[in-house]
């Protein structure tokens, strides 16, 4: 996969491209449906399956008071897109200048002139251009006049729920990480540095790790994988439970590893 971080980095041979546009925070089940359709269309026409995403999130620029906490960094998003055979990702710096582009200017100056689009796939609620005045109907009209296909992918429903980044954030913050994992189609994880604690675990029960994370969305406080928080009558009883939990966790992660190593299917 090739990753570009500005329009200046985009090469002249970026196209012909089949492109999807969006924030893709989490690269969840709904996003993957778009990506898989994009790759299939690109393979059919010998186009390059490509993604245009933004950093920072556009809301951080136009409405910073409403900016969401993000599930994934742009780098992590690109890693997840690689799993779906995306070949090119442009992480476009979202500035006030980009925000000021009219729908026509956005299509002319970026999609056509720089990214050489032959097809654009977006979700049915896609909006673009200054003050989000552009919509999928206008995009399709631009495509007919400028020579690219437009395809709209409908909202994805999973177990009766609309799959969305905002819904997944809510699930994680509420501690419903299993539900979040189903909607993401991959386990939600936290990156960070292991830092020194007070050493109570090592002295009284079992050694533990303390993680200083830079993640913006952190699950609700609690004990995951095994049980709710509870008190024990002695350090020995807590240690015995922790060791049982370790065995349970190892079994769980063996199943997760097998699930992640399964062949990818295309819908």
Image (cartoon, helix red, strand yellow):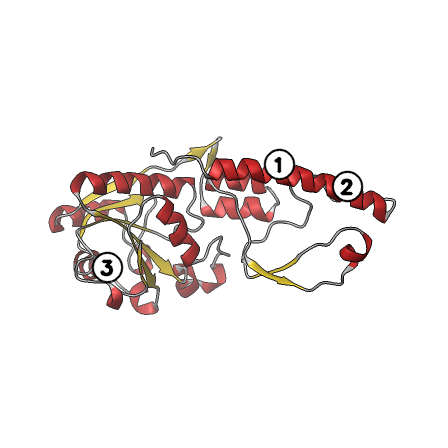
Q: 23 or 267, which is in the foreground? A: 267
Left or right: 157 in relation to 196: left
Dot in front, 1 or 3:
1
Residue at the extreme right of the image, as rendered: 233
Dot in front, 3 or 2:
2
Q: Tell me the quadrant of the picture where the C terminus can be found.
A: top left
Q: 103 or 207, which is in the foreground? A: 207
**Residue corresponding to mark 1:** 251
**Residue corresponding to mark 3:** 106
Residue at the extreme top of the image, as rendered: 159
User: Is disc 1 surrounded by few (<14), some (14 to 19) or many (20+) residues within 10 Å?
Assistant: few
Work out whether mark 1 precedes mark 3 in sequence or the reverse, and give the earlier one. 3
**Residue corresponding to mark 2:** 241
Q: CA distance from mark 1 to mark 3?
A: 50 Å
User: Is disc 3 surrounded by few (<14), some (14 to 19) or many (20+) residues within 10 Å?
Assistant: some
Left or right: 30 in relation to 215: left
Q: x, y percentage for residue 69?
A: 51, 57
Residue at the image position 74 percent from the left and 42 percent from the top:
243
Q: CA distance from mark 3 to mark 2?
A: 58 Å
Left or right: 6 in relation to 217: left
């Amino acid at each position: 996969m090739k990753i570009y971080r500005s329009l200046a980095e985009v090469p002249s041979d970026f196209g012909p491209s089949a492109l999807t546009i969006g924030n893709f925070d989490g690269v969840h089940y709904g996003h993957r449906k778009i990506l898989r359709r994009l790759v299939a269309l690109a393979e059919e026409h010998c186009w390059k399956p490509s993604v245009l995403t933004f950093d920072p999130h556009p809301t951080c620029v136009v409405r910073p008071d409403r900016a969401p906490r993000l599930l994934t960094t742009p780098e992590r998003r690109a890693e997840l897109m690689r799993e779906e055979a995306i070949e090119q990702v442009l992480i476009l710096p979202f500035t006030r200048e980009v925000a000021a582009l009219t729908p026509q200017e956005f299509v002319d100056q970026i999609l056509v002139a720089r990214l050489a689009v032959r097809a654009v796939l977006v979700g049915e609620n896609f909006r673009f251009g200054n003050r989000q005045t552009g919509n999928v109907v206008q995009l399709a009209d631009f495509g007919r006049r400028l020579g690219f296909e437009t395809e709209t992918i409908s909202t994805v429903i999973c177990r009766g729920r609309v799959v969305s980044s905002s819904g997944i954030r809510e699930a994680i913050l509420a501690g419903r990480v299993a539900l979040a994992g189903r909607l993401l189609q991959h386990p939600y994880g936290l990156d960070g540095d292991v830092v020194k604690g007070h050493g109570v675990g090592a002295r009284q029960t079992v050694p533990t790790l303390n993680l200083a994370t830079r993640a913006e969305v952190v699950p609700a406080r609690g004990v995951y994988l095994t049980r709710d928080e509870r008190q024990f009558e002695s350090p020995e009883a807590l240690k015995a439970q922790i060791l049982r939990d370790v065995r349970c966790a190892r079994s769980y992660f063996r199943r997760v590893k097998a699930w992640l190593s399964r062949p990818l299917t295309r819908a």
